[in-house]
Image: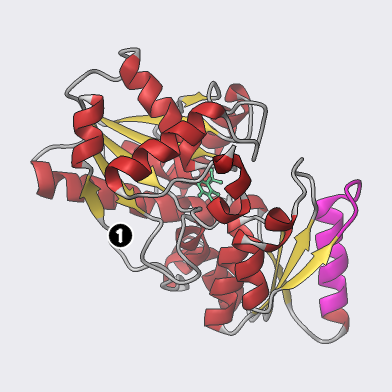
Amino acid sequence: MKESLEINKIDLINKPTALEFMPRLSDHLGVTIYVKRDDQGGRGEGGNKLRKYERILGDALANGCDTVIIAGHYQSNAARLLVASACRTGLKSIVICKNFIPRQNDAFDRNGNALLMHIMGADLRPIPQDKDYAEAMEDVAREVRKIGGSPYIIPFGGSNLAGTLGYVDCSVEISKQMLELTGKEADHIVATAGTGATMAGLLAGLTLQQSTSRLWGFSILHPKKESESITDNLAMQALHHLGSNAQVKATVDDGYLGEGYAIPTRQCLEASRLVARLEGLFLCPVYTAKTMAGLIDYVKTGRIGSGDSIVFLHSGGAPLLYAYYDSYYK
Ligand SMILES: *Cc1c(COP(=O)(O)O)cnc(C)c1O
């Protein structure tokens, strides 16, 4: 397992992704802020799931699987990038869709990620609200086997050991790029916490490198405690896998989540407008704009000191803007 995850890894995102200075946002906030462009550098419009799929799909291919199955919804970045990665590598993909987000209009059902998946010819399988995802994935896997196929079930959000290792890679890139650009490590690294592998990989990677950067996660999905324990768990698995028994303790703030996953907050809409107007960079109201709202508030309230250097992880998701267009015209 240890070696095979590395041997079987495939390239889905052009590495290293860019690290860019954001001069006007820095001036505006009184800090020095860089953006790690994990929203760019791959197919399917880019995003953090590509780093996770490098080892997950590598494992699927090495095991002779021909069909990947994911659970999500019509606006899932994880599903859109899985379909794109499957198209690219010649795998079939099946997306099991539940409409659990309290938002139903034509844009949400057909634009954004739904549109991109439709164009790629994705096999979307709607299931009822009360049906269990795991059960639905097993049903589909059985169906694939029945017709002679070999299915591979993608873990929720791509967050398992293989996915986490993708973000260990990213943390090494960030440290190296900051050293090259500024001669020192960032004071802070800020990322979005969802299903956990992104934060966990960064935490494990920074721990391995004995980095002095402080990692802050902003939750867009789980309550603080749950998000922290998921992160710690995955980070420990990655560290163990990489031969370290270092202890870690993630810090995740759920104060900018608002009413819940995929429900925009006023501050996140403002944050995405601000970054677009100052930097021409797009953050989406489900993920990175909530994180940016947290970061802005941390600077305003002094939890991040003025003059500090910050790396903000742009984990992707801009196609969601088209699905949420109505929030911006209000
Ligand atoms: C999935 C996703 C995240 C969250 O990453 P996790 O590894 O699930 O915590 C953050 N940003 C975007 C744009 C995503 O699609």
Q: Crowding near pointer 1: few (<14 within 10 Å), some, many (20+)?
A: some
Q: Nearer the viewer, residue 272 or 182?
A: 272
Return the x and y of residue 17 as percentages of the image width and height. 30, 59
Relative to 280, say whether 83 is above or below: below
Q: Is residue 308 left or right of residue 147?
A: left
Q: Is residue 205 visible?
A: no
* Residue closest to the far top: 301
Q: Is residue 152 left or right of residue 42?
A: right
Relative to 172, say whether 301 is above or below: above
Relative to 117, say whether 87 is above or below: below
Q: Nearer the viewer, residue 4 or 149?
A: 149
Return the x and y of residue 121 as percentages of the image width and height. 68, 79
* Residue closest to the far front: 329
Rendering quarter of residue 205: top left
Name which residue lies at 47% across and 60% down.
2
Q: Amino acid at mark 1?
A: Thr
Q: Which residues are magenta?
A: 127-144
Q: Is residue 188 left or right of residue 221?
A: left
Instruction: Report the residue marked by disc 1.
Output: 17
Name which residue lies at 57% across and 30% down.
265
Q: Magenta stretch containing residue 213, yes or no? A: no
